[in-house]
Image: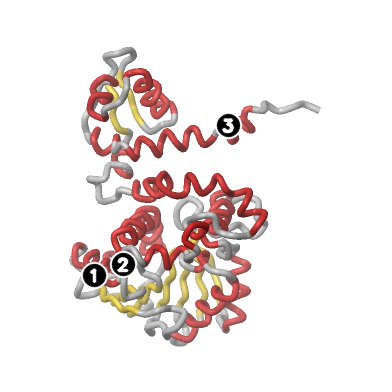
C-alpha cells in the first residue's frame, strides 16, 4: 500500500498561518492603500509603519498565496493588487467584502480557539461566556457595533443575493419580503434586477434606520420599504415571496420550524419561500465550508446549526409546503426554495 504525501495534513494543521496573514493585511488596510498603485516593499513598509524584518516575508507570503502580484525581484520589485483583491478587498470599491474578514480577525479568530470546549459542552464560546447574554441581545445593545456586524454580513452575502436575483425567476411575483433583512442588501439586489417587484426589508426596530440609509443610498426608496417587528413574536408581512438570507442557521430546530411556519402563513397559494444558506450536501461529505459554518454557529450561538436541502424539505413539508428545489448560487452557497 502506497502512503500519500502527508503535506495535506500539515497544510491544514498550519492553516491558521495563512488565515492570519490575510486577516492582518485587511486589518492594515493594505489592499485599499495600494489601490491601483504599485509600490516597493520598502514603500509599503513605510506606508504601513512596519518593521523592515518582516515586511518582505509578509508581502511575499501574500504573493505566494495569490493575494498580491509582483513585478520583478529583489528590493526594487513592485507589488500591486490582484484583480480579485482590487475588486473585493479595496474598501473604496462597492463590492468590498473585507468587513467579514475584519470581524473574523477581531472576534472569531480567538473564539475558535475554544472549539474543543464547544464540542464538549455544546455551549457558545463568544461574548456569551463573559456577559451571559445571547449573541444577538449583546449585538443589538450596541448600535455602532450592530451596524458594523450588519455590513460584515452584507459583504459576505451580497454576491449570493445578486446571484439569486439573476438566477431565480421572479417574473411570476409582485411582492417580496426579506425576513431578517438587516441592511436591506437582499431586497436591494432583487429590486435592482427586477423593476416590477416591490420589496420589504423586515427586521427588529433597531435595524430599521440602518436599512433605510442603505436603501436611500441605492436610490430605491420608491420600491424598497422597511418594516419592523420580532419575527418570533409578530406575524410576518404578507408577500408573494418570503426570503431569509443566512437566518435559519442561527437557531435551534424548534425555532427554525417556527420561522418556516410563519413564512408559510405569510404566503399566498403558489407563493415561494427562499432561504439562502451554505447548504450542506445531503450525504454530508462535500461542502466543507457549510460544515465549518455549522461549527461556527455552535461557537456563536450554541444551538444554531446549518443543514442539508433534505432537512429543509422535511421541515417545510411539515409546515404544509408542497414543492421544493435547490438553486446553486456561488461557491458553497445555495438557495433552498419551497412553494406553497
The numbered disc on residue 11 is: 3
Task: Work out how far the residue at label 2 is from the one at label 3, CA to CA, in angstroms.
Answer: 38 Å
- Left or right of residue 287, residue 329 in this image: left
The x and y percentages for residue 298 are: 57, 58
Circle 3 crowding by C-alpha within 10 Å: few under 14, some 14–19, many from 20: few
Q: Which mark is residue 184?
A: 2
Mark 2 / mark 3, whichever is N-terminal: 3
Name which residue lies at 39% across and 53% down.
156
- Residue depicted at x 45% and y 81%: 271
Q: Position of residue 257 (x, y in %)?
A: 56, 77
Quadrant of res 48: top left
Element class at badge 1? helix
| 44 in relation to 92, above or below | above
Of labels 2 and 1, earlier in sequence is: 2
Which quadrant would the N terminus be assigned to in this image?
top right
State the residue at coordinates (29%, 38%).
29
Q: Are marks 2 and 3 in contact (CB under 8 Å)?
A: no
Compute the Cα span from label 2 to label 1: 8 Å
Q: Could you say whether the residue bearing mark 3 is in a helix, strand or loop?
A: helix
Which color scheme did the rendering employ for the protein? secondary structure
Cβ atoms at labels 2 and 1 below 8 Å apart = yes
The label shown at residue 212 is: 1
Amino acid at each position: 500500500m502506497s502512503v500519500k504525501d502527508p503535506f495535506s495534513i500539515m497544510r491544514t494543521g498550519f492553516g491558521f498561518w495563512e488565515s492570519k496573514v490575510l486577516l492582518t493585511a485587511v486589518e492594515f488596510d493594505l489592499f485599499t492603500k495600494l489601490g491601483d498603485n504599485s509600490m516597493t516593499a520598502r514603500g509599503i513598509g513605510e506606508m504601513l509603519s512596519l518593521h523592515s524584518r518582516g515586511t518582505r516575508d509578509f508581502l511575499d507570503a501574500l504573493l505566494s498565496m495569490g493575494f498580491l502580484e509582483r513585478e520583478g525581484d529583489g528590493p526594487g520589485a513592485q507589488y500591486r493588487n490582484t484583480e480579485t483583491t482590487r475588486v473585493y478587498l479595496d474598501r473604496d470599491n462597492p463590492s468590498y467584502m473585507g468587513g467579514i474578514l475584519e470581524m473574523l480577525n477581531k472576534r472569531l479568530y480567538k473564539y475558535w480557539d475554544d472549539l474543543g470546549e464547544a464540542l464538549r459542552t455544546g455551549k457558545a464560546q463568544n461574548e456569551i461566556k463573559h456577559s451571559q447574554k445571547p449573541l444577538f441581545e449583546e449585538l443589538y445593545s450596541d448600535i455602532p457595533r450592530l451596524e458594523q456586524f450588519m455590513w460584515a454580513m452584507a459583504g459576505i452575502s451580497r454576491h449570493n443575493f445578486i446571484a439569486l436575483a439573476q438566477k431565480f425567476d421572479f417574473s411570476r411575483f409582485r411582492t417580496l419580503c426579506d425576513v431578517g433583512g438587516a441592511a436591506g442588501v437582499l431586497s436591494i439586489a432583487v429590486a435592482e434586477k427586477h423593476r416590477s417587484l416591490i420589496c420589504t426589508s423586515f427586521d427588529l426596530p433597531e435595524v430599521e434606520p440602518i436599512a433605510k440609509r442603505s436603501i436611500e443610498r441605492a436610490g430605491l426608496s420608491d420600491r424598497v420599504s422597511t418594516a419592523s417587528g420580532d419575527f418570533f413574536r409578530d406575524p410576518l408581512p404578507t408577500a408573494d415571496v418570503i426570503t431569509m438570507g443566512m437566518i435559519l442557521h442561527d437557531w435551534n430546530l424548534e425555532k427554525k420550524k417556527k420561522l418556516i411556519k410563519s413564512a408559510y402563513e405569510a404566503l399566498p397559494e403558489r407563493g415561494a419561500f427562499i432561504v439562502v444558506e451554505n447548504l450542506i450536501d445531503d450525504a454530508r461529505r462535500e461542502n466543507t465550508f457549510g460544515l465549518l459554518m455549522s461549527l461556527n454557529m455552535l461557537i456563536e450561538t450554541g444551538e444554531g446549526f446549518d443543514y442539508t436541502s433534505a432537512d429543509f424539505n422535511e421541515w417545510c413539508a411539515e409546515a404544509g409546503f408542497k414543492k421544493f428545489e435547490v438553486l446553486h448560487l456561488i461557491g458553497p452557497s445555495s438557495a433552498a426554495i419551497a412553494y406553497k
